[in-house]
Amino acid sequence: MKILIVLTYYRPHISGLTIYAERLAKAFAARGHEVTVLTSRFKKELPSEEVVDGVRIVRAPVLFRLSKGVIMPTFGLIANRLVRETDVIQLHLPQFDAAGISFRGRLLRKPTVITYHCDLLMPPGLFNRIANIGVSFMNQLTGLFTHRIVTYTQDYAENSSFLKPRLGKLKIIPPPVVLPEVTKESIFEFAREHNPQNRHPVIGMATRFASEKGVEVLLKALPDVLKEFPTAVVQFVGTYQKVFSEETYFERLRPEIEKFQASGNWQFLGELDPEQMAKYYPNLDVLTVPSLNSTEAFGLVQIEAMMNGIPCVTSSLPGVRQPVKIHDMGAIFPIGDSQALAQSLIAVLKTGKNNYQNKLDFSRYQPDDIARAYEELFQEIQQTL
């Protein structure tokens, strides 16, 4: 089967959406499919076309950025060619350019599936508000033309402004989650390198430094946590400097963060590759996901942490609360409530990670099983065309 996957940003860009797309693309290729990813050439140094891990990546040239999106004048021409060559299409939303692809899929009777990752809520500002309206409109058109829609949880679907009116097209498929195997010695070496003073407990936060991620909620909670655990340290993993359209947000929080850095209670570890992440999680005592709005729909990092026996403390966002609910590993607190976050972190840390029973069903997140579920969906659509 020839599979075309379309999304705005692909690797080496790092986000939950791109990680999902990469894992699924590799799983499709491993199952013998011919996989092409159509995406943006968001960095000029990236090749316009290459093959990585059996996946062909085609990158459309970017004329300029528009808020968090990109303008690609030749995208449509490239899409015309690739859609005609393919058997099935998988689109990752939110994405401005997806409507044209889904229309082509409908017109040419190619089974077309949306993977809907989250509602789009741009940072404050007139320009971002206009961009938000534009992308939302294009998403609505995509939802009209597509054959089926996949999302992570029923909880998120029933609370999403985009998904709720389209429950009849919906298919729930868990996200693909996998981490490379690493040795115990390499895990200890990671700790020696990044926590040489052996400060504990270690509170993890793994995400981009963005306003919707709720970094300030954790910052406000930290003083109460430090009263109970004075040597606690937050290890923040992910891009935190010069995050596009989030520079003002970082600068606003920087003075408070620097105070915690000076006292040894906050560390930025930067971007980590999958192998480094597999060493990072076991060294945590808890992972927190204090996200504030529906741009967060699940939090893949929670499953990655739980696979390593690490409990999570997460905000009660639809979808995001599901990993803790399903696997009973951690605590859920009201959205944006820093005092409740502090209390939840303290309670989970006092319980201790070794006392959380890992109820994780690994099979439901295996990329090969997720790829098989998509194959069955494509075949189901094909039978109706």
Image: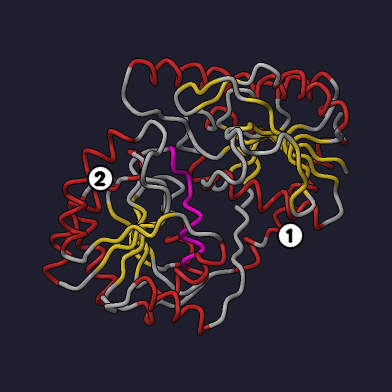
Residue span colored magenta: 295-305
The residue carrying pointer 1 sits among few (fewer than 14), some (14 to 19) or many (20 or more) residues within 10 Å by Cα, namely some
Q: Residue furthest front?
A: 45
Q: Which residue is mark 2?
A: 336
Label 1 sits on a secondary structure element that is helix
**Location of residue 307 with respect to 161 vertically, above or below:** below
Drawn side of residue 132 relative to residue 209, left or right? right
Quadrant for the N terminus, please: top right
Q: Amino acid at mark 1?
A: Asp
Q: From the viewer's side, name the closer residue of 327 and 233.
A: 233
- Tell me, yes or no, whether the highlighted magenta stretch contains residue 304: yes
Which image quarter: residue 192? bottom left
Q: Amino acid at mark 2?
A: Gly
For image coordinates 50% across by 62% down, the residue present is: 303
Q: Position of residue 290 (x, y in %)?
A: 32, 51
Q: Position of residue 382 (x, y in %)?
A: 86, 35
Cα–Cα span, label 1 and label 2: 36 Å
Label 2 sits on a secondary structure element that is loop
For image coordinates 65% across by 66% down, the residue present is: 363
Drawn side of residue 380 relative to residue 148, left or right? right
Residue 342 is marked as none
Q: Position of residue 181 (x, y in %)?
A: 61, 74
Q: Which residue is mark 1?
A: 368
Q: Residue furthest left?
A: 227
Quadrant for the C terminus, please: top right
For image coordinates 28% across by 41% down, the residue present is: 250
Q: How many marks?
A: 2
Drawn side of residue 192 relative to residue 162, left or right? left
**Location of residue 224 with respect to 20 vertically, above or below:** below
